[in-house]
Image: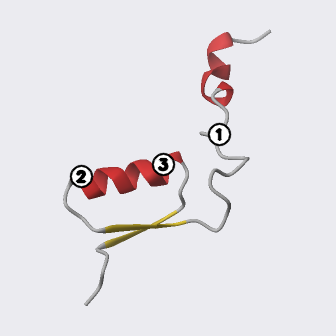
Amino acid sequence: MPTHDVLVAGCGIYGVTAALKLHARGHRVAILDPGPIPHPLAASTDISKAIRAEYGPD
């Protein structure tokens, strides 16, 4: 018998969000990522990556 309904590959911001939403809907979710958590190159590691575009061109 499987212990999980869904496997999410990638624990970045999108993978974790997908896993949380699936879990909230009653799925048993496993997440898998080959890199360290938090990954130093992930979009969610540095908040300035999320707001940099708001400054506009210099």
Residue sitting farthest toward the left:
26
The structure residue drawn at horizontal position 63% and vertical position 50%, both measured from the top left corner, is 38
* Mark number, residue 14: 3
Residue 16: % across, % down: 45, 52
Q: CA distance from mark 2 to mark 3?
A: 15 Å
Residue sitting farthest toward the right:
58
Residue named by callout 2: 24
Discs 2, 3 touching: Cβ within 8 Å? no
Q: Of the residues under marks 1 and 3, which one precedes in the sequence?
A: 3
The structure residue drawn at horizontal position 61% and vertical position 21%, both measured from the top left corner, is 51
Residue sitting farthest toward the front:
37
* Labels 1, 3: front one: 1
Looking at the picture, which amino acid does disc 1 mark?
A: Thr
Q: Quadrant of the N terminus?
A: bottom left
Looking at the picture, which amino acid does disc 3 mark?
A: Tyr
- Label 3 sits on a secondary structure element that is helix
50 vs 18, left or right, is right
Looking at the picture, which amino acid does disc 2 mark?
A: Ala
- Label 1 sits on a secondary structure element that is loop
Residue named by callout 1: 45
- Label 2 sits on a secondary structure element that is helix
Asked where in the image residue 26 lies, by quadrant, the reply is bottom left
**Is 34 situated above or below 51?**
below
Asked where in the image residue 8 lies, by quadrant, the reply is bottom left
Asked where in the image residue 5 lies, by quadrant, the reply is bottom left
Q: Of the residues under marks 2 and 1, which one precedes in the sequence?
A: 2
Q: Of the residues under marks 2 and 3, which one precedes in the sequence?
A: 3
Q: CA distance from mark 1 to mark 3?
A: 13 Å
Residue closest to the eye, 57 or 21: 21
* Mark number, residue 26: none
